[in-house]
Image (cartoon, rainbow, N blue to C red):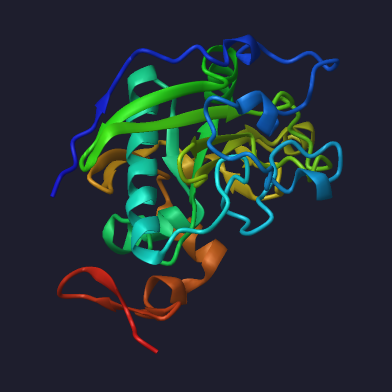
């Protein structure tokens, strides 16, 4: 069943004072104190205290795929699936509305390959953006909160886009900050990791053209990603890389595209669904 989402164009301005590029003399992250009024959490579980000072995004003390500024515990299996579905639907809707180029990658692309859905054991979503898009998001939408009406939620739900201040640093030496931005459900703490696909300038210096890279040392050929293909994911329009099969086999191996039993789930080819196997 198609889920229709109404995206309000009004962007809440509660955090507008940090929507500009952050100077080095400012605080390097939005700590829990600066988010009061958005978060219901009073105790910081972001994991920040145990991380190096130069790390921008943090993973919660109770699970790596929750933002501990907005959550204090993991969600049950069924509830998490619903919230993750809303998470990607609202993200795709927003990026489409504002004209930011984005596409699925990694485990989310693998879920798309199987049945155009998030795999039920996943606890986050992975997407990529272009260098032009991350600059656009940083300049105009950093720390904005977006309100959506979703079925079954009378008051609607809010999501925050957060871009790190040093998103322009494409060095693989900056291995503490491979994530460039996050789309965060501020009710549950679930988030989408947003990474930037960049020109591989090291390869270009060697005279090699058409090479792309990410800060986590993933490398691609430009024609593996572009032109992007139009498709559908969780009942929403989405873009995927051009050579998606090749990319998935390189990352996960050929068996990932044929193995119908994984993570205590079995893929029902008739229903086109991953079904949880009771232990």
Q: Residue 6, image x and y in percent?
A: 23, 26
Left or right of residue 207: residue 210: left
Is 243 rendered above or below residue 228? Answer: below
Is 216 rendered above or below residue 163? Answer: below
Q: In which image quadrant can residue 56 be found?
A: top right
Q: Which of the pair 137/250 is nearer the observer?
A: 137
Tell me what residue is drawn at x 21 percent, y 75 percent. Answer: 269
User: Given the current orientation, which residue lies at the most extreme front position?
Assistant: 42
Tell me what residue is drawn at x 45 percent, y 77 percent. Answer: 263
User: Given the current orientation, which residue lies at the most extreme bottom position?
Assistant: 279
Q: In which image quadrant can residue 143 be found?
A: top right
Tell me what residue is drawn at x 41 percent, y 81 percent. Answer: 264
Tell me what residue is drawn at x 67 percent, y 33 percent. Answer: 32
Q: Quadrant of the C terminus?
A: bottom left
Q: In which image quadrant can residue 5 be found?
A: top left
Q: Residue 16, image x and y in percent?
A: 57, 11
Q: Residue 20, image x and y in percent?
A: 64, 11
Residue 120, visible in the rendered structure: no
Q: Which of the pair 191/74 is nearer the observer?
A: 74
Q: Residue 106, image x and y in percent?
A: 50, 55
Residue 198, visible in the rendered structure: yes
Left or right of residue 273: residue 255: right
Left or right of residue 151: residue 25: right
User: Total marks drawn?
Assistant: 0
Is 263 rendered above or below residue 183? Answer: below
């Amino acid at each position: 069943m198609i889920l229709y989402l109404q995206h309000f164009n009004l962007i809440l301005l509660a955090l507008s004072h940090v929507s500009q590029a952050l100077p080095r003399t400012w605080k390097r992250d939005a700590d829990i104190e600066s988010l009061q009024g958005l978060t219901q959490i009073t105790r910081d579980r972001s994991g920040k205290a145990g991380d190096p000072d130069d790390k921008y995004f943090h993973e919660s003390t109770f699970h790596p795929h929750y933002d501990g500024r907005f959550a204090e515990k993991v969600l049950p299996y069924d509830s998490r699936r619903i919230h993750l579905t809303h998470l990607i639907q609202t993200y795709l809707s927003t990026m489409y509305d504002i004209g930011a180029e984005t596409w699925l990658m990694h485990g989310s692309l693998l879920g798309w390959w199987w049945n155009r859905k998030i795999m039920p054991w996943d606890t986050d979503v992975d997407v990529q953006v272009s260098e032009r898009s991350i600059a656009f998001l940083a300049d105009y939408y950093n720390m904005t909160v977006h309100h959506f009406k979703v079925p079954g939620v009378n008051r609607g739900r809010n999501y925050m886009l957060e871009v790190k201040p040093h998103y322009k640093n494409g060095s693989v030496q900056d291995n503490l900050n491979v994530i460039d931005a996050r789309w965060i459900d501020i009710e549950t703490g679930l988030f989408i990791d947003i990474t930037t696909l960049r020109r591989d300038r090291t390869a270009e210096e060697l005279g090699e053209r058409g090479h792309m890279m990410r800060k986590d040392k993933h490398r691609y050929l430009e024609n593996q990603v572009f032109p992007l293909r139009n498709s559908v994911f969780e009942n929403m329009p989405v873009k995927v890389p051009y050579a998606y099969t090749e990319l998935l086999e390189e990352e996960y191996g050929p068996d990932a595209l044929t193995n119908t039993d994984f993570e205590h789930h079995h893929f029902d080819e008739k229903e086109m669904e991953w079904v949880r196997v009771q232990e």
